[in-house]
Amino acid sequence: MYSVGIDSGSVATKGVLFDGNNIIKKIIIPTGWSPKCASLEVYNKLTKDIEKSDIKKVIGTGYGRVSMDFVDKKVTEITCHAKGIHFLNNNIKTILDIGGQDSKVINLDNDGNVSNFIMNDKCAAGTGRFLQVTSNLLGTDVGSIDDLAKGAEPEIISSMCTVFAESEIISLLAKSVSKESIAAGILQSIANRSKSMLSRIDILDEIAFTGGVAKCSVLVNMIEESLNKKIYIAEDTQIIGALGAAIIGYKK
């Protein structure tokens, strides 16, 4: 028997096929203009070789879950991230998650349930969207900013507002400040924002960093240095919510 978890975010839609013990298959595709279409595509790809009678439950999560009229249940991404990380590492009690449009810090109890959380969803400050926009100004993308920033001295980016940060970066480029230093400064500003969010909640035991932005090793190192604490990074940081949704579905 299997369960399916689908996490539809603003940037990417992720899916996991789960058998109760292992991830059998995982898929990540761009969400595009229609979260519903992306979610259906992920579902069909995950289950194309499986009898529908062998699927226990299909659980939807993420901001696009409201459009998933084919799932058995919709669960918040906060709950799903907690369950996904707890399955991978049950020593984790605090999660920093940076998604495309929001960021959040979650505390877990010993059973992987959410005990507390804070969330920034009012603006794109410190999110994947912020990183995407600012990276584009440097002629690079989110996947390559790590290489650009590596070893560079961070230039101070004082504004976390995406609009004001754009103006600030354009001004720095006009002053011939190196793209490497600006890239490092962008990541440092996100690290500072992350530390500020973490300071508003109790940091319990080990910390995990989830979401696509967690793939940026320079940013991870900056946050670790600011906290003086090692951070757990899963093998695939983007599928944690989908994994948690699949786990919830299997247990039901």
Image (cartoon, helix red, strand yellow):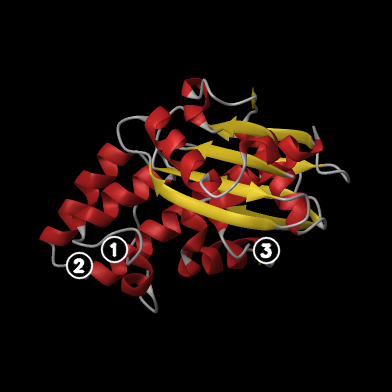
Q: Residues within 10 Å of mark 3 (few under 14, many from 20)?
A: some
Q: Nearer the viewer, mark 3 or mark 1?
A: 3
In the visual, does 47 lie left or right of 91? left
Q: Residues within 10 Å of mark 1 (few under 14, many from 20)?
A: many
> Dividing the picture into quarters, in which one does residue 173 lie?
bottom left
Quarter of the image containing the N terminus? top right
Nearer to the camera, 233 or 59 = 59
Q: Earlier in the sequence, mark 1 or mark 2?
A: 2
Q: Earlier in the sequence, mark 3 or mark 2?
A: 2
Name the residue: 70% across, 35% down. 79
Query: Farthest bottom residue?
Result: 151
Q: Secondary structure at mark 1?
A: helix
**Which label number is shown at residue 232?**
3
Nearer to the camera, 212 or 69 = 69
In the visual, does 137 lie left or right of 248? left
Name the residue: 81% across, 38% down. 251
Quarter of the image containing the C terminus? top right
Q: In this rendering, does residue 121 appear at all?
A: no
Name the residue: 20% across, 67% down. 177
Q: Nearer the viewer, mark 3 or mark 2?
A: 3
Q: In this rendering, does residue 90 appear at all?
A: yes
Residue type at mark 3: give it.
Answer: Tyr
C-alpha gap between disc 3 and disc 2: 33 Å
Q: Earlier in the sequence, mark 3 or mark 1?
A: 1
Residue type at mark 2: give it.
Answer: Val
In the visual, does 154 lie left or right of 191? left
Determine contact: label 3, label 2, CB under 8 Å: no
Residue type at mark 1: give it.
Answer: Ile
Residue ID for mark 2: 177
C-alpha gap between disc 1 and disc 2: 7 Å
Determine contact: label 1, label 2, CB under 8 Å: yes
Residue ID for mark 1: 182
